Amino acid sequence: MHEEIANRIDIRRIFKTSKQVMEEAYENILKYRRGELIPAKTGYDYIDEALLGGIFPQHAIAIGARPSVGKSYVAQKILENVMNPMINPQAEDYFLVNCEFEMNPQDLLLRRMSQDMKKRAPEILRRQDSNTVEEMRMFEILQGEIRNNIIYIDAPCTVKEFEAAVYHIATKHKDKRLIIFKVDHIALIKRMGLDPKSAIDDLVAVMNEAKLVYKNIFFLIISQFNREIEGRIKSPQEQPPRLSDFYQSDTLGQLCTLMIGLHNPRRYGLDKYMIFGKDWYQTLDRFKTENKTSFRTAGLVFHHILKVRQVSMEELTNTIHYTVEDVTNNQDQEQETKEEQSVY
């Protein structure tokens, strides 16, 4: 009976010889050594270190945080750097699909203008007499956002629609060096009667299948943390993000090469963050309190590496990093809080 099933399915097609698999992997390694392929630099040294030099195809990373911490901003900066030919010489041969399930196009463009012009969004929107110089700058920013190798899915779609989109793009652009799908954020996929867990499980299954089938695809996933991290805020030993703070962390963990948790403890009224030995995190000494056993919080967003697949945690220079809080962006980020979903 079992032999009949095997014959009917033609199970032989799923096998490859060790020679086929290993020689293909070896050829890829040589292409990177020779500079024919170059990992895409993210602009964040700690991410590039964890990814063995930058973004490689057939991988995925996840960035998680509570609302209004800046996870979408970090993802945006990563992709700006990845798609910048001055940083990545092969960027013209990359293709980016922005799946913006949370922010509408006006908010995205306004955020970009706010960052580049160093003005808060309300100042840009405020009614005023025509300012030719300022509007010329706004037009320049607009033109910089219009690229032939960047497209958008600007509203939530179903898992089936997402799957069709992935395979359409991957087939059409199979000769590109790198295809990037950014999903912001994963829990906003249309459920179509499914419970949240099943919808995300199905979506991750599509991504996992695609990155195994296509040799040039990469996924950048934004995820909202559940509320557990807020319940630990009073205990310094338990304040940092954990892998379990990701909604559907087990499912995401199976997909992702790297998972990063962002935290802004100042937003919870904390002047000090974490507790540790004086000799820990020496490269971050300038951000520590006077006794060097905690971090100061003013103006800082902390980046925690929660999972890495390609190296051990011990091999990394640090598992905690920081960015200076982008104050021009705070008001725009409040939309994330308003749109937080009941699934959490």
Image (cartoon, rainbow, N blue to C red):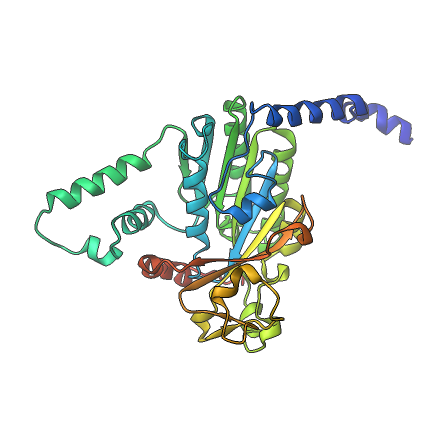
Residue 10 appears in the picture as rendered: no
Q: Position of residue 48 (x, y in %)?
A: 55, 43
Residue visible at 62% across and 67% down in the picture: 279
Q: Nearer the viewer, residue 177 or 334?
A: 177
Residue visible at 54% across and 67% down in the picture: 227
Where residue 149 sits, quadrant-wise, is top left
Tag count: 0
Where residue 206 sits, quadrant-wise, is top right
Residue visible at 55% across and 40% down in the picture: 219
Q: Nearer the viewer, residue 15 or 328?
A: 328
The image quadrant where one finds the C terminus is: bottom right
Q: Position of residue 95 (x, y in %)?
A: 46, 30
State whether residue 285 is above or below residue 50: below
State whether residue 293 is above or below residue 29: below
Where residue 205 sits, quadrant-wise, is top right
Residue 286 appears in the picture as rendered: yes
Residue visible at 76% across and 27% down in the picture: 14
- Left or right of 85? Residue 51 is right
- Left or right of 319? Residue 112 is left
Q: Nearer the viewer, residue 1 or 90?
A: 90
